[in-house]
Amino acid sequence: MDDSSDTLNGAPLTPGRWLSRQRHLGGTALNLSVGLGLAGGFLLIWQAWLLARVINAAVVEGTPLDGLWHWLWPLLGVFALRAVLAWWSEQVAFRAAAQVKLALRQRLYRHVQALGPAFLHGERSGELSSLLVDGVEKLEAYYARFLPHMAITALVPLAILAFVFPLDWVSGLVMLLTAPLIPLFMILIGKGAERLNQKQWRQLARMSAHFLDVIQGLTTLKLFNASRREAQVIAAVSDVHRKSTMAVLRVAFLSSLVLEFFSTVSIAVVAVLIGFRLLFGEMAFFHGFFVLLLAPEFYLPLRQMGAHYHARMDAIASAERLVEVLETPVPATPAEPAPPPAGPFAITFDKVAFDYPGGRRALAEASFRIAPGETVALVGPSGAGKSTLLNLLLGFLQPGAGQIRIETTDLARMERDAWLRQVAWVPQRPRLFHGSVRDNIRLARPDADHAAVEQASRLAHAHEFITRLPQGYDTPVGEGGQGLSGGQVQRIALARAFLKEAPLVVLDEPTASLDAQSEVLVQAALARLAEGRSLLVVAHRLATVRQADRIVVLDQGRVVEQGKHAALLAAGGLYARLAAAYGGDEEVRP
């Protein structure tokens, strides 16, 4: 089975198992880190032996300092070598964790991208951003510290026992019997801390999502004088998060206290037993001191595991959401994809049906056709299925029944990326990214030269306002189009559509929320865009609908009317009622 698989025998993996299965992403670096740690453990045993030999020779045998240098020089060398190995092990483990984080971020990003806007529409952007940044970042300590240390905890104490038992089986037996108590209580207390930590991570994700939503809507909050109220809400949410964090820390400190208590008592028992046997002359000083030096080092990895166990809890808390996102199925890719046609083509919706999770019906046997070069407007009340039709046509959703045919080929048989290269999409709220105006237009065709960008801008009536900007096409644009008006952002989106030169253009309410002057310019650009192309427009304004070659009226997921504007008004059906509801001159929605 592929190690990268997120399922086991068809069943979803638990977050802990999933984390363990991603260790291969770190390559051989994790194994090298464990090997270095084990080498450091053997050096520690050698260090204890040399130190015991020096003390025994100096204190018991009365050897002068000149007779100890042949032990002291190797001891200093062991000190230096242990320091080098510890630093090297830390660097290698960090490098391995960085590789795992990079690979998981890329996988998560590609998966979210493959899920498409239909998935993102139901998610909060702040929560996803927190997952991509903080969620993946919390995995670093798991791979850099917990996994290597878990292997060292299993190997180093066993190596110490192998040296202790031949010299003092009583101390070895005490170590063997008391060692399991430390991880046992660590797990018992850690389970409670793990549940609290998972709850705290979910609160952090919700808080991040809420905070980002507030920042993005800050202008609206200011306009409605609601910023102070929202600040109080954020303060209350932050206080709840603070209390949950303190609850996790209380349990974490309790876990550390228990680990220190049991390890201290165990070392004390070993020391007392060795002391009595030295007192009664039943044991050589060298052997007793050597075992006594090894006792704290025997329990040290187990005590440190308690600290690193909290890294595991943090990782599991974030992995729970990571697994949930990565296990969301992406639209199926056809085994032998058919190439989409290159030129203008006919699109046929043949009894298309679609249900959202939970049984909510969005479309029920919707049927209509878009002829090559035809402009079709979709009209209907809210919830009629217009956005669902667009998502189906763009390949972000798959029909539950029926077919969408491009000429004679089922859209489900086409590879989605190849199909999307034939489509230009202008959403209701176009997204501009941080960069120059030119960069944002070239998003449609990254290899386009300046002449092509300028020509597309002229066709979209964007060139005039762009040249008036401080740096023209090189003017920086803020995230989300900050610094530009809604009409200017919409015309840049139309310039993208012109630059792409796709045979099909899909527009979702292109004139919504625009002032009268901007609407006139956008309408003129749409008229040019329709030349030689097929257009599918979701529109509410009559000015957009009147220009359509055909209007398709949807109601409760069904096509109830089709025809031109004047004919539908004369028919007196749903379209006429929608137009009359707004006086016949503004919008066609209730």
Image (cartoon, rainbow, N blue to C red):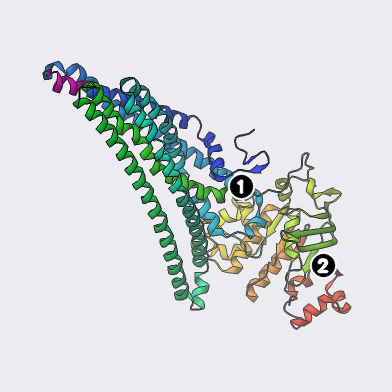
Vertical side of 203 occupied by 51: above or below: above
Magenta run includes residue 58: yes
Q: Which mark is residue 326?
A: 1
Asked whether residue 6 is drawn in magenta, I would say no
Say which residue appears at 63% left-offset and 60% top-offset. 122
- Which residue is more in the foreground, 485 or 11? 11
Q: Secondary structure at mark 1?
A: helix
Quadrant containing the C terminus in the rendered view = bottom right
Query: Residue 292, position in %: x, y?
Result: 26, 29
Residue drawn at x 76%, y 65% is 385
User: Residue 345: percent from the left, percent from the top?
Assistant: 82, 53
> Which of these two is toward me, 218 or 27?
27
Question: Can residue 476 be seen in the rendering of this structure?
Answer: no
Residue type for callout 2: Val
The residue type indicated by label 1 comes to Leu
Quadrant of residue 496 in the image? Answer: bottom right
- Which residue lies under the disc numbered 2? 552
The span picked out in magenta is 53-63
User: Residue 13: horizontal and vertical position, in percent?
Assistant: 60, 43
